[in-house]
Image (cartoon, rainbow, N blue to C red):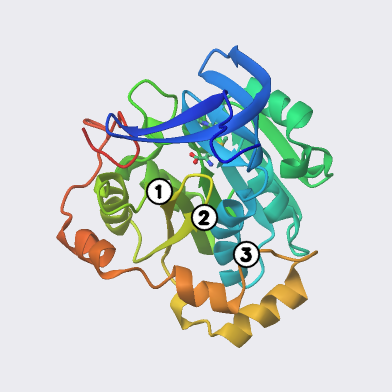
């Protein structure tokens, strides 16, 4: 390809009417609608296969480990001995894969509202789940994550939220409120840990991230914001870890590396003792936005995004 030739097929990630990131694609492997959302699996030229739901990019083959290790590993490695873990959402199966790496885990319950997303992931995204759906420790349920927690009598050592962003017309906006976080807290064991994906930490779209951090802080004693750069999104992505007793910032590099060696099967590609220091130390503009935020997200007027990170 000469310098001036550009591919003709693109997919577009809409961050706002004025910010659109695009990726060249070789083709579309699946495009359809479920009861809940529009589903696309495409093959990009640079990042391999990717999943897109309701026009929102979810993850891509060649860098999904950055997002999924960030979401799962800090929480599981902070817990002294995670045995029972729940993943709410998690369609691609990559959060499940990360949970199942832990030798101490004997039960991983994954609750995704959309069976069709999981069917697509099984068919087109094998490296994401890596066989996790058929692991004997996995319990896979297709139902709303909030209803599941309301009706379940089980307690979990770690609960992970890997759900789509709280889009206006999407299926997930009821799972980001204070009332939902209070429900989660009741379903955690004594030293239980809660980890969420929490939208972008882009300096121009910090509403969702700061509101979710503030909302979690109204429920949990200790809330730790952190973020990682996701090349496929071309943007930083935020997470929060919430607990009433443990503190990830007290773990030094050596201790994290020791826990990884002792407790995790296979090699992590992103998270280790050094990466931990990087992701839990946020830049000043993010820390300032978190300090200034006063809004708590409540059931009676839940946050509904039109575009990632923006409460409008
Ligand atoms: N990496 C993602 C991101 O950037 O937002 C999240 C990944 S995962 C594909 C999101 C999953 O959340 C989807 O499979 C979707 O079906 C599921 N989901 C959305 N709302 C849900 C709900 N109310 N209960 C359970 N799962 C839900």
What separation in Å lies between label 1 and label 2 (alpha carbons)?
Answer: 20 Å
The x, y position of residue 171, in whole percent, is 44, 25
- Category of crowding for the residue at label 3, using alpha-carbon neighbours closer than 10 angstroms: few (below 14), some (14–19), many (at least 20): some
Identify the image quadrant of the N terminus. top right
The residue at the point 76 percent across, 66 percent down is: 267
The residue at the point 27 percent across, 62 percent down is: 286
What separation in Å lies between label 3 and label 2 (alpha carbons)?
Answer: 27 Å
Tell me the quarter of the picture where residue 247 sits.
bottom left
The residue at the point 62 percent across, 64 percent down is: 270
Q: Closest to the observer: 169 or 136? A: 169
The x, y position of residue 209, in whole percent, is 32, 50
- Category of crowding for the residue at label 1, using alpha-carbon neighbours closer than 10 angstroms: few (below 14), some (14–19), many (at least 20): many
Count of picture labels: 3
- Category of crowding for the residue at label 2, using alpha-carbon neighbours closer than 10 angstroms: few (below 14), some (14–19), many (at least 20): many
Residue 285 can be seen, yes or no: yes
Precedes in sequence: disc 3 or disc 2: 2
Residue 270 image label: 3
Identify the image quadrant of the C terminus. top left
Residue 217's place in the image compared with 137, above or below, is below
According to the picture, the residue beneath numbered tag 2 turns out to be 188
According to the picture, the residue beneath numbered tag 1 turns out to be 198
Can you tell which of label 1 and label 2 is closer to the viewer? Answer: 1
What separation in Å lies between label 3 and label 1 (alpha carbons)?
Answer: 19 Å
The x, y position of residue 2, in whole percent, is 62, 38
Q: The residue tagged with tag 3: helix, strand or loop?
A: loop
């Amino acid at each position: 390809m000469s310098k001036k030739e550009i591919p003709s097929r693109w997919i577009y990630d809409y961050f706002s009417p004025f910010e659109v990131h695009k990726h060249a694609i070789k083709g579309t492997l699946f495009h359809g609608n479920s009861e809940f959302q529009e589903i696309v699996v495409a093959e990009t030229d640079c990042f391999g296969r990717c999943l897109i739901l309701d026009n929102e990019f979810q993850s891509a083959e060649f860098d999904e480990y950055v997002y999924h290790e960030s979401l799962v590993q800090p929480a599981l490695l902070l817990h002294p001995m995670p045995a029972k873990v729940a993943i709410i959402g998690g369609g691609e199966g990559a959060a499940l894969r990360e949970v199942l790496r832990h030798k101490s885990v004997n039960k991983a319950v994954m609750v995704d509202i959309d069976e069709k997303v999981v069917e697509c992931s099984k068919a087109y995204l094998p490296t994401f789940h890596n066989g996790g759906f058929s692991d004997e420790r996995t319990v896979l349920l297709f139902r709303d994550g909030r209803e599941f927690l309301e009706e379940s009598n089980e307690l979990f050592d770690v609960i992970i939220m890997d759900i789509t962003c709280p889009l206006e017309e999407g299926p997930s906006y009821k799972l980001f409120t204070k009332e939902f976080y209070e429900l989660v807290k009741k379903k955690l064991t004594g030293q239980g840990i809660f980890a969420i994906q929490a939208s972008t930490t882009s300096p121009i779209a910090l509403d969702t991230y700061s509101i979710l951090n503030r909302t979690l802080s109204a429920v949990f004693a200790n809330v730790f914001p952190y973020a990682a750069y996701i090349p496929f999104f071309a943007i930083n992505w935020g997470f929060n870890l919430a607990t009433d007793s443990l503190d990830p910032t007290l773990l030094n590099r050596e201790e994290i590396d020791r826990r990884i060696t002792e407790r995790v099967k296979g090699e992590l590609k992103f998270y280790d003792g050094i990466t931990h220091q990087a992701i839990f130390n946020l830049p000043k503009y993010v820390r300032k936005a978190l300090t200034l935020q006063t809004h708590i997200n409540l059931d009676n007027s839940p946050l509904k995004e039109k575009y990632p990170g923006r409460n409008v």
